[in-house]
Amino acid sequence: MRYKYHPPYLVKKFFDEFIWETSNNKILLTFDDGPTEIATLKILNILKGEQIKAVFFCVGNNIKTRPALAEKILEDGHTIANHTMNHKMLTKMNREESIEEIGAFNDMMKEKFNYDVKYFRPPYGRFNLKTNKILNELNMKCVMWNLLTYDYENNLEKVKYAIENYLNKNSIIVFHDSLKCNDIIQESLNYTIEQVSNKGFAFGELEDCLK
């Protein structure tokens, strides 16, 4: 049951160049798949009110169609990271296609925002040895997680279960900035923030969390 929420030890051991947890015993909030008209501003408003910085693993085409939301994420002091250009599964693509999916995102961010992208997370959490080699060539770091909330199932009770049972002081938490979890994202975030405080943990910022 635990491995539904927390990656197996052997996977983390084999892919030890990937980042699976924070290094400073603080919690890092991450959001996949945005930006979206329906959820991004909700998330940003909560983060601003609580003075928490997060990492947004964005999809390139979502940024192309909603550049103002990407700009807002950056203006609020958050990090934008690479979740590929089209949210395609890397394990189903060859090396050249994978490089194009990742590189096109980085090129777009540089062109539109003069922003250098340092961090990557594979869509659907799927990766292989090829992924690791490509990221090394691109001088990027893969940031995974050690707490999957299942918020995309749009069930608040499942999110609460994940947070209650698997939150640790070094957690990298995955939420989603998408239509799938829009109905529960505010309550999910507020509940998580409350539990972090109740357990005596603290949120951290990316550069310190991933040293």
Image (cartoon, rainbow, N blue to C red):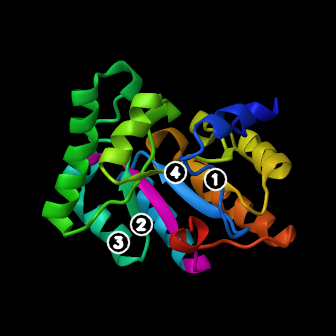
Kindly check if marks 4 and 1 are in contact, taking CB atoms under 8 A apart as contact: no
- Secondary element under disc 3, as helix, strand or loop, is helix
Amino acid type at mark 2: Thr
- Secondary element under disc 2, as helix, strand or loop, is strand
The numbered dot on residue 74 is 3
Q: CA distance from mark 4 to mark 3?
A: 19 Å
Q: Quadrant of the C terminus?
A: bottom right
Q: Quadrant of the N terminus?
A: top right
The mark nearer the N terminus, 4 or 2, is 2
| Discs 4/3, front | 4
Q: CA distance from mark 2 to mark 1?
A: 15 Å
Q: Which residue is mark 4?
A: 143
| Discs 4/1, front | 4
Q: Which residue is mark 1?
A: 173
- Secondary element under disc 4, as helix, strand or loop, is loop
CA neighbours of label 1 inside 10 A, class few (<14), some (14 to 19), many (20+): many
Q: Is residue 134 left or right of residue 9?
A: left
Is residue 51 inside the magenta stretch?
yes
CA neighbours of label 3 inside 10 A, class few (<14), some (14 to 19), many (20+): some
The mark nearer the N terminus, 3 or 2, is 3
The mark nearer the N terminus, 4 or 1, is 4
Q: Is residue 38 visible?
A: no
The mark nearer the N terminus, 4 or 3, is 3
Q: Residue furthest top?
A: 92
Amino acid type at mark 1: Ile
Q: For the point 74% across and 39% down, which residue is it? A: 158
Instruction: Tell me which segment is drawn in magenta.
Output: 49-61
Q: CA distance from mark 4 to mark 1?
A: 11 Å
Q: Which residue is mark 2?
A: 79
Q: CA distance from mark 4 to mark 2?
A: 12 Å
Q: For the point 57% across and 74% down, which residue is it? A: 208
